[in-house]
Every structure is written in C-alpha cells, then in structure tokens.
Amino acid sequence: MTETPNPNIVDADSITGEMHPIRRVVVALGANLGERFAALQGAVNALADTPDFFVTGVSPVYESDPVGSPVEDAPKFLNAIVLADTTLPAARLMERALAIEDAFDRERSEVRNAPRTLDVDLIVVGDRRSNEDFLRLPHPRAHERSFVLQPWHDLEPDATLPDHGPIADLLQGSDSSGLTRREDLALEVE
C-alpha cells in the first residue's frame, strides 16, 4: 500500500503562515465521448499541474460499459484512478475537478449518467465527510462501481473506502462483467 501521509503533519504556507493538513486523495476519471484517452491524459496532466496537488500514482486504464445510461447503445467508458497527496481543501479540489471537466467541454444536463467527454470525481479526500449538494464525500456510489474499485485496487490493494470497508471486499461484491483492462493504453504523469 502506498503510505498515506500522517493527517497530523501540517504543511505551513511560508507566505501566509496558514497551516494545511496533508490528505490522501482518490480521483476517478472517466470519458465516453470524443477522444476518450486524450481526455483522460489531459485530466492527469491538469491534476499534476495543480499547485499543492502531488500525484503519487495513476492506475491502468479500463474500459467499461456505461452504468444506468439513459442513452441506448451509449459508447463505452475509459476509466482510471489518480492517487495524490494534497494540502488543498476539499471544496477547492471540487472546483478544480469541475474546471478540468469544463476544459474538456463537459456538458452538464439534468439527465443523470448521460454520456460525457470527461468525468472527474473526487472519491476520497482524506477522512473528510461531506453531504453538501456540490460535494459528497466519500463518493456516494464508489462502493458499487467496479470501474472505480478495480483500478484503485490495482494501486492500493489494501485500501479502505471510508464508511464502506476494504476495497478488495467491495470489489468482490461488485459487478465487473463489463470491465476490461486496456493493456494497449497507459496514462503518464508528465
């Protein structure tokens, strides 16, 4: 397992003197419209370019059937997980995730699970819990999504999803029938 920073260790901003705890972050990426792989690689690059956000791992790429799509014959998704350590607050991370989606022409609608050019989901931000409309942590459906659990398991097989348990156990209980590892695709951190 990749070592999670001690939440009691604090990073002090040398200019303002503000104290910020270092947190482990799990980010899920997905795309099923347009240049899917380019969108995932662009999201990894954008995350790596985020100040105070330090990418520590990127999973293999998986292809998955859309879950609950309102569109018949919706294209398959490409999915990956990014692990990082950060001192950024969860709300600022959510703003960054939305900005990255916008940069890749993500169109939002009232239709849930519609096809999209890019999805950047915060799965876990340290031990932070949130049930706000704009930010739900841990992600409310991650525990049942094999396209989140499998790539995360590849990086951290003994990780635990807060409030749900070990991801290895959750993965065994999830439906992974539409999930395929894409050996021909590999995301890189630049």
Image: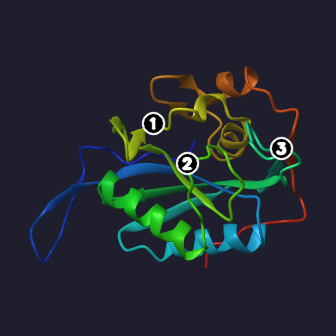
Looking at the picture, how far across and down is residue 77, in whole percent?
78, 53
Pinpoint residue 79: horizontal percent, then vertical percent.
72, 53
Residue at position x 65%, y 47% from top?
155
> Residue drawn at (51%, 64%), measured in percent from left and top?
55
Residue 137 percent coordinates (x, y)? 41, 38
Where residue 170 sits, quadrant-wise, is top right
Q: Which residue shows up at 45% across the image and 23% down it?
A: 163
Q: Tell me which amino acid carries mark 2.
A: Glu
Q: Which residue is mark 3?
A: 65
Residue ranking furthest to the front: 110
Disc number lying in front (3 or 1): 3
Question: Which mark identifies residue 34?
Answer: none
Q: In the structure shown, which secondary structural element does the residue marked by tag 2 occupy?
A: loop
Where disc 1 sits, the SS reads: loop
Numbered badge on residue 138: 1
Which residue in the protein does label 2 denote?
Answer: 110
Q: Is residue 108 left or right of residue 32?
A: left
User: Label 2 vs label 1: CA separation?
Assistant: 22 Å
Describe the colour scheme in one phrase.
rainbow
Which numbered disc, 3 or 1, marks the residue that appears first in the sequence? 3
Crowdedness near tag 3: few (<14), some (14–19) or many (≥20) residues, C-alpha within 10 Å: some
Residue at 73% x, 74% y is 38
Asked if 24 appears above or below 85 in the picture, the reply is: above
Q: Amino acid at mark 1?
A: Pro
